[in-house]
Amino acid sequence: MKNKLFFGVFAAMLIVAPFSASAGTFQAEENYQLNPGISIEDNLYAAGGTVNVAGKVNGDLLAVGGTVIVSGPVSGDAMLAGGTLNLSGNVSGDMRIAGGTLIVLNTVAGEFVAAGGQVSVMPGTSVGKDATIAGGTIQYAGSVSRNLKVDGNKVYINGPVGGDVSITAQEIKFGPNAVIQGNLDYYSSSEAIMEQGAAINGVVNFHKTEMPAKKAVEKGVLLGFLTVAWLLKSLMMLTAALVALYFVRSQTTAVIKDAGSNFWKEMGRGFVVLVVIPIAIIISLVTVIGIPLGVIALLFYGIMLLVSAIIAPLLFARLAIDHIFKKGGKELNWWIAIIAIVVFGLIGFIPIVGWIFGFLIFLASFGAVTNHIYKKLK
């Protein structure tokens, strides 16, 4: 549950920043590289099997890939996700990252938020504000100017912290370079290990909590698996959305327009069709004569669900542009599509509220897709 709540917070932090972007450079290919000495003079959105940013980004950086390497400076915020992240480029804003294996050695002027199966923050790393980390095995040897919050299985802190520290973990150890200026609150089944040289200048509060070892180990593994699965799903959804926008743009635009202008009506239609068609298919399949029709209907039903899932994040973008940012005349394009898919997917990690929100958007998309197909057939 804590991981889901963490991802909820992670999603919420990403919602506002990306949509405020008015321009950007988009790069999507199997292996993308921004060479040293090359500068991007606006926001950079990059996706691929391997993303290597060695040049300078004079704006925000949003990158997703199997492997993401950032060694060049970023003048804005950095939002990164991938199977393996290796980060050594300095970030002038906030950094928010998620992945299976995270290796960090840089300077982050703002906040630092990370989620991963294995998180290694190397000596020499510095965070200008707060740091929040969730994962399996966490090693933090950098410095934090303000507060540090950690949720993991095995946690090793070996760097100075200017504020308070809060840790929830199975095993907790403080190295010789760990100097905490504020208070330490930690939740664990056993007391933390203090190596010689470690210092806590504030109050230490130990909350003895039974934490099953198996569950703690699985937490980081599951976190990394979910991140990679979400990444692959997002890349597939992005490809399909771009195909819809640029190859069947008129039909896609018409469906999104109907769903946006008649949201509640199309949502109701989508709910009815979602329930009625499976019942009709089951009735057809239990009769010998109706089996061929039932099979065809089942395949057609699956296609409609898939198309609606692709349309849903684009509808989300359309609603946000029209009703939140008040830019009704702005057309959907590639960079809006990638931001919408990332944010819409992350909202789905928010327990209850995110699930309901995503389901309602999907129902409206499903209703509009169904109505559009019905009009075409009629």
Image: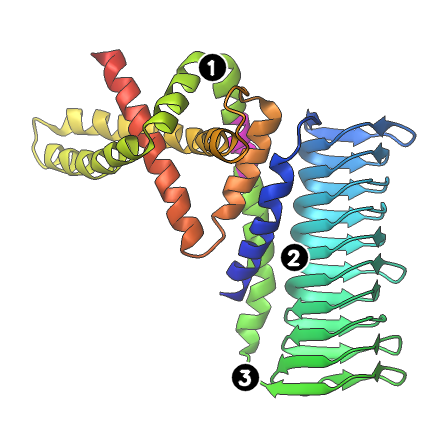
Magenta stretch bounds: 234-240
Marks 3/2: CA distance? 23 Å
Does residue 307 lie above or below 19 as drawn?
Answer: above
Question: Mark 1 or mark 3, which is nearer to you?
Answer: 1
Task: Look at the image and tell me whether residue 190 can be seen.
Answer: no
Residue 146 in percent (x, y) is at: 78, 66
For image coordinates 82% across by 58% down, the residue present is: 128
Marks 2/1: CA distance? 37 Å
Residue 325 in percent (x, y) is at: 55, 33
Q: Which mark is residue 249?
A: 1
Q: Is residue 236 magenta?
A: yes
Does residue 38 lie above or below 342 as drawn?
Answer: above
Query: Which colouring convention does the figure follow?
Result: rainbow
For image coordinates 85% across by 82% down, the residue present is: 198
Residue type beneath disc 1: Arg
Residue bearing mark 2: 116
Count neighbours of disc 2 (C-alpha within 10 A) and say few if under 14, some if 14 to 19, many if 20 or more: many
Residue type beneath disc 2: Gly
Choose between 257 and 2: the one closer to the eye: 257
Q: Which mark is residue 50?
A: none
For image coordinates 82% across by 46% down, the residue present is: 92
Q: Quadrant of the C terminus?
A: top left
Q: Say whether marks 3 and 2 touch (CB < 8 Å).
A: no
Residue 367 in percent (x, y) is at: 29, 30
Say whether residue 13 is left or right of residue 202: left
Residue bearing mark 3: 210
For image coordinates 82% across by 40% down, the residue present is: 75
**Residue 251 picture quarter:** top left
**Residue 158 picture quarter:** bottom right
Choose between 237 and 344: the one closer to the eye: 344
